[in-house]
Image (tube, grey):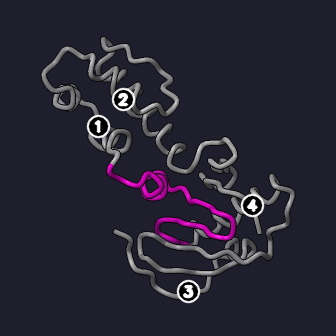
Amino acid sequence: MKIGEWWIEDRWTVTPCDGDIGDMHHECVVLVRAISELVDDINFNIPSLELKDDYDGDYHMLVEDLNNIEVDDWFEYLMEKGVERNLYDRALDMNQDHRIVGMRDYGWSAVRNGCVDTWCLTRKKMKEIGEGLMEIGDQVNMNLDDVEFCIEDFSTHKLFTATPRQLNEGRAMSIQKTQPVH
């Protein structure tokens, strides 16, 4: 089954992320949001910097603009001015997997064809994923109601299987525990 790659952001919001066909991939979608949040926070706390509103996820352009701040250490400067450290880390820490940031910090679920990656699989999250998968099915003109998906909960390293219909009912079958990737 080929449905491509998506983020399920909430029950009705799904974003295509298949970087192979020209769209942004999962990590880039998260980076665009993280950079936007950081820039909003910087502009709120230090309006005199007048950073542009739309970096469109361009990490290098943002770093170049930050390097133009006439201070000894722009990280310390931003922190002293009240910029939130977690927003800074989400946007500018390139030593992390931004898919994890999307799942853990934004509550999104990543879909790659028959696989769904999520963080903290609860009954509410199952319903969100089930409805999101049905929305993806609508967008790709496929009935996915009874198609079985493999779901990995990255917070517990457990694997589950379920159809979107079962997920909407809050049911998923545990199949095994995975090993964390380092």
Disc 2 marks which amino acid?
Asp
* CA gap, disc 1 and disc 4: 37 Å
Q: Amino acid at mark 3?
A: Ser
Report which residue position mark 1 lands on.
84
Q: Are marks 2 and 1 in contact (CB under 8 Å)?
A: yes
Q: Name the residue at 72% across, 71% down.
A: 164
> Which callout, 2 or 1, points at the residue further toward the start of the chain?
2
The C terminus appears in which quarter of the rendering?
Answer: bottom left
Height in image: 175 above or below 1?
A: below
Q: Which residues are magenta?
A: 95-122
Query: Image point 34% across, 23% down: which residue?
Result: 64
Question: Which residue carries the number 4 mark?
Answer: 3
Task: Give the residue type at disc 1.
Answer: Glu
Residue 174 numbered mark, or none:
3
The x, y position of residue 73, in whole percent, is 15, 26
Dot placed on the residue nearer the N-terminal end, 3 or 1: 1
